[in-house]
Amino acid sequence: ISICPVAGTWGLTYDDGPMYYWPVTKENSKWAEPNLYDYLLKHNQKANLFYIGSKIMGAPAAAQRGLNDGHTICSHTWSHPSMTTLTNAEVVAEFYYSLRMIKQVLGITPKCWRPPYGDVDDRVRAIAWQMGMRTVIWDRDTNDWNINGDQVAPGPGAITYATANKTVNGWIKSREQGKDNSRGHIVLEHELSNATITLSEFWLPTIQKNYKTMPATACNNIAQPYWEKKFIYPIQGSVAVDTDGVPTGVKAPKT
């Protein structure tokens, strides 16, 4: 899965959560959870949250908040490695321990995962599929993860906040001018730092105005993103499908 099929759709996704800082300080805490989740709730917005297993262990309440707020949870591995550099056994371990932590803390088993750095090949993709997960990537990258020590929103990367801001603004302008009508998009964002949170919260109202904004799984009509069948999420279309694209027969509300 790499796009939203319907033009004018923004697949909202956040990697690397749940976000927290250690040690906890007053300055750090204002950027950590619940900052982003409060903002999404205020704007009635749901997203895909790609959680790192080891970070769930450090912030279980934040992960539970994400699920309870109605966001769709997916795996982002246990420790965020470059997956294609690992042996088969190491790949399995990354998936297994991530899924185990998600199940232990949240009571769900995701059918979706995202490779750190987008680093995936057919071997890793096949292992994920055998372990019950469809690979979800993106076709647009905000580069929020790469924002540097800019005064607006300090971060650890190599580009300025203004550069990342310009990237998102360009997409919005293209949509407004009628130049972005062939398909929708899955967009890479992060709950990673004060810089990523600042960029996301600044642009979300404008994105909602110009795009039908929803989780990437919703725009691909996946109503049951977990192996636990009791969870049924809204979808964009009228026919709910499984992660392999086969109709499930499940009646799902429209987003």
Image (tube, rainbow, N blue to C red):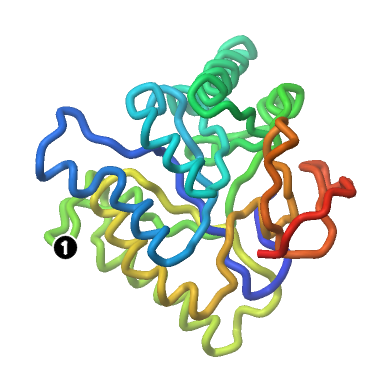
> Which of the 4 image quadrants contains residue 56?
top left
Front residue of 103/178: it is 103
The three-letter code of the residue at mark 1 reads: Val
Q: Residue at x 36, y 46 (%)?
A: 191
* Label 1 Cα crowd, 10 Å radius (few <14 / some 14-19 / many 20+): few
Q: Is residue 98 visible?
A: yes
Q: Residue at x 52, y 29 (%)?
A: 106
Which residue is label 1 attached to? 152
> Percent position (x, y) of residue 71?
53, 48
> Percent position (x, y) of residue 210?
52, 80
Front residue of 107/197: it is 107
> From what the image shows, is residue 135 above or below residue 128?
below
> Percent position (x, y) of residue 45?
49, 62
User: Helix or strand or loop: what does disc 1 sit on?
Assistant: loop
Q: Residue at x 48, y 24 (%)?
A: 105
Which residue sits furthest bottom?
A: 177
